[in-house]
Image (cartoon, helix red, strand yellow):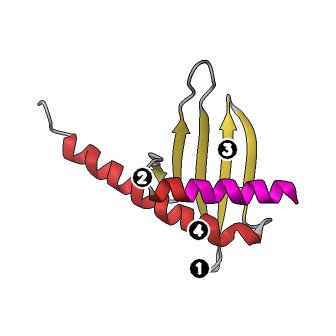
């Protein structure tokens, strides 16, 4: 129970910080976005990846949130096995995708600078 509360609080925190524009999500591909939280003072970076998986039935989308530190998986949340987290991970994916798109647009705008 306590672990479930920690997961939900953490995901809600990620969603809030994403909405505030404090997490620089980047597009990996059409179905995955990633954020690397850089370590400070000897702390190793943490890689957070959020994936959307489309199953044969179009309305059947699942989300996988993976958190890794130093090559080891710290946790993985899959809405196939944790369906109660589907709504919040869907919202996080939507908001993070918006951030990743604006990062991509800014990169494109700056592409020819200094040439």
Queried whether the magenta region covers residue 29, the answer comes back as: no
Q: On the image, which quarter does residue 40 sit in?
A: top right
| Sooner in the amino-acid sequence: mark 4 or mark 1 | 1
SS at mark 1? loop
Q: Mark 4, residues whose alpha carbon is within 10 Å: few (<14), some, or many (≥20)?
A: some
Magenta extent: 1-15
Left/right of residue 31 with respect to residue 101 in the rendered view = right
| 2 and 1 marks in contact (CB < 8 Å) | no
Q: Residue at x 71, y 67 (%)?
A: 85
The residue wearing badge 4 is 90
SS at mark 2? loop
Q: Position of residue 46 (x, y in %)?
A: 62, 35
User: What's the distance in space between the residues labelled 1 and 3, CA to CA?
Assistant: 27 Å
User: What's the distance in space between the residues labelled 4 and 2, CA to CA?
Assistant: 17 Å
| Sooner in the amino-acid sequence: mark 2 or mark 3 | 2
The residue wearing badge 2 is 21
Residue 71, can we see it?
A: yes
Viewport quadrant of the C terminus:
top left
């Amino acid at each position: 129970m306590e672990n479930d509360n920690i997961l939900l609080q953490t995901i809600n925190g990620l969603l809030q910080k994403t909405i505030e524009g404090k997490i620089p999500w980047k597009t990996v591909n059409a179905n995955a976005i990633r954020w690397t939280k850089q370590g400070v003072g000897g702390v190793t970076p943490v890689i957070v990846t959020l994936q959307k998986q489309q199953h044969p039935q179009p309305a059947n989308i699942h989300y996988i949130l993976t958190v890794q530190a130093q090559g080891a998986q710290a946790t993985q949340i899959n809405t196939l096995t944790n369906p109660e987290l589907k709504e919040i991970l869907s919202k996080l994916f939507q908001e993070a995708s918006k951030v990743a798109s604006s990062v991509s647009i800014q990169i494109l705008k700056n592409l020819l600078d200094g040439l």
